[in-house]
Image (spheres, rainbow, N blue to C red):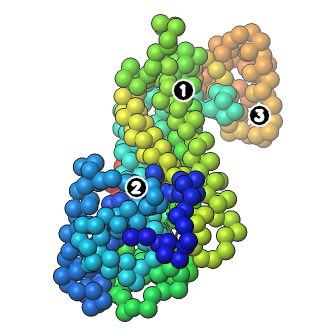
Amino acid sequence: MTLRSRFGKEMDDLAKGYTASIPFDRRLYEYDIAGSIAHARMLAKQGIISDRDAELIIMGLTSIREEIEQDRFEFKKELEDIHMNIEVRLIAKVGDPGAKLHTARSRNDQVALDMRLFTKDAIAETLRRLKALQKALLDQAQENKKVIMPGYTHLQRAQPILLAHHVLAYFEMFQRDVERFKNCLERTDVLPLGSGALAGVSYDIDRDFLAKELGFSKVSANSLDAVSDRDFVIEYQAAASLAMMHLSRLAEEITLWSSAEFGFIEIDDAFASGSSIMPQKKNPDVAELARAKTGRVYGHLMAFLTTMKALPLSYNRDMQEDKEGLFDSVDTLLSTLEVFAAMIACLRVKSDRMRQAVEQDYTLATDIADYLVRKGIPFREAHTIVGKLVRYASELGRSLTEIELSEYRRFCAEFDNDVKSITVESSLAARGSSGGTAPEEVEKALAAAKKKLNG
Ligand code: ARG
């Protein structure tokens, strides 16, 4: 079979190589075959081809799937793409009936279908892995419910928080990712098949039947849009970029926290790498690579947004460039989610070090200012007083607990003995505003997270 009867010569080898997508779109084979089987069934149901022809086509396609899965299929570059490779093989296997499969169909609606089927599966797997990561985070939060650490702003110790509160912040980020991917699924879940090359088809087809067979909940409304819409690819990549951004932040904290300077956590040996020269090294390579791989996912998003920019309607060959970037984004996100869930499940928390870091610094300064506010001093004034107090203590190299009441009083007469009862624990307990780090609130947040995970 050739698509070149109107040409006077063969395509140049260089042009063939340049335009072929088979090196990468072979990955779509199972979706292409599923789409073709549904299409053949529909054609037979509508009396466009005979039942016998449909049967032979389906048998042929089923055995081609086996050939591909058993690595017996010979992919040919000169056949350009996965669609032609399968169709040509089908005709070689079953003869004439195979040549009827492409009735009422174009590669333009065919490839749009394949990409949507692929993306729907990718979203389902992404959701599964996001939830597995959320579960690993929740388990760590639950297990270390009592662990206290300094919370940071500007990477400077700020106020005491529960480690669980910090971990649940990541749970929330990934929850937004879950919602984004679910939302993206709604617009991916639209059947483009039956749009033909661009204008619809001149046969009495049944698109609702196709949608049902292929598990789509909607049928596209406009044939031009259906063959030229790749918003769903961009949406997946945008959602993947955000998810990778979240993973990169987590990666950064794992990297920092496992350094000797922090010493807050220890990565399990099974997830750490050694150095080729320094025998003592234990490196957080998984986290570092996740941090790095975020770049390529952002890159694919920008690349394909740019590919689609200013494309006239409807299908243009430019759109073939949707594939490698999407495939790589899916692979990168899925593998990062998977390895993170496993690595986090066995992270060891060094609660002593975290506690030490809270005690060592001036993380109770806000509580001391709040104490003065309760004694009737305006907050801005209290802020100034405690600022001076911290400066005094730090110049002496002492912590606030090591300062005597008489010294406190030099800064403000309102200080009383009870200022000494401000502790890390009382600081935590005081932050009972909804969504705060008070143990009670965190307990509620843990329960809510569990519900979200199972919901
Ligand atoms: N390989 C092509 C793609 O990925 C398939 C559709 C080709 N359609 C066409 N009219 N040449 O977009």
> Tag 1, which secondary structure?
helix
Q: Earlier in the sequence, mark 2 or mark 3?
A: 2
Whether residue 191 appears in this view of the structure is yes
Q: Which residue is depicted at the point 78% across and 27% down?
A: 387
Mark pair 2, 3: CA separation: 77 Å
* Above or below, 315 relative to 85: below
Kind of residue at disc 1: Thr
Closest to the camera, between mark 1 and mark 3, is 1
**Residue beneath disc 1:** 255
**Rendered location of residue 70, percent (x, y):** 24, 49
The mark found on residue 382 in the picture is: 3
**Residue beneath disc 2:** 76
Whether residue 351 appears in this view of the structure is no
Indicate left or right for 330 with 38 as reference.
right
Mark pair 1, 3: CA separation: 37 Å
Kind of residue at disc 2: Lys
Closest to the camera, between mark 2 and mark 3, is 2
* Above or below, 351 relative to 56: above
| Pointers 1 and 2 in contact (C-beta within 8 Å) | no
Mark pair 1, 2: CA separation: 46 Å
In the picture, the quarter occupied by the N terminus is bottom left
Q: Which residue is depicted at the point 40% across and 36% down?
A: 339
> Label 1 crowding class (10 Å Cα cut-off): few <14, some 14-19, many 20+?
many
Q: Which of these two is toward me, 53 or 265?
A: 53
Q: Earlier in the sequence, mark 1 or mark 2?
A: 2
Q: Which of these two is toward me, 256 or 77?
A: 77
| Pointers 1 and 3 in contact (C-beta within 8 Å) | no
> Tag 2, which secondary structure?
loop
* Above or below, 275 relative to 225: above
> Tag 3, which secondary structure?
helix
Closest to the camera, between mark 1 and mark 2, is 2
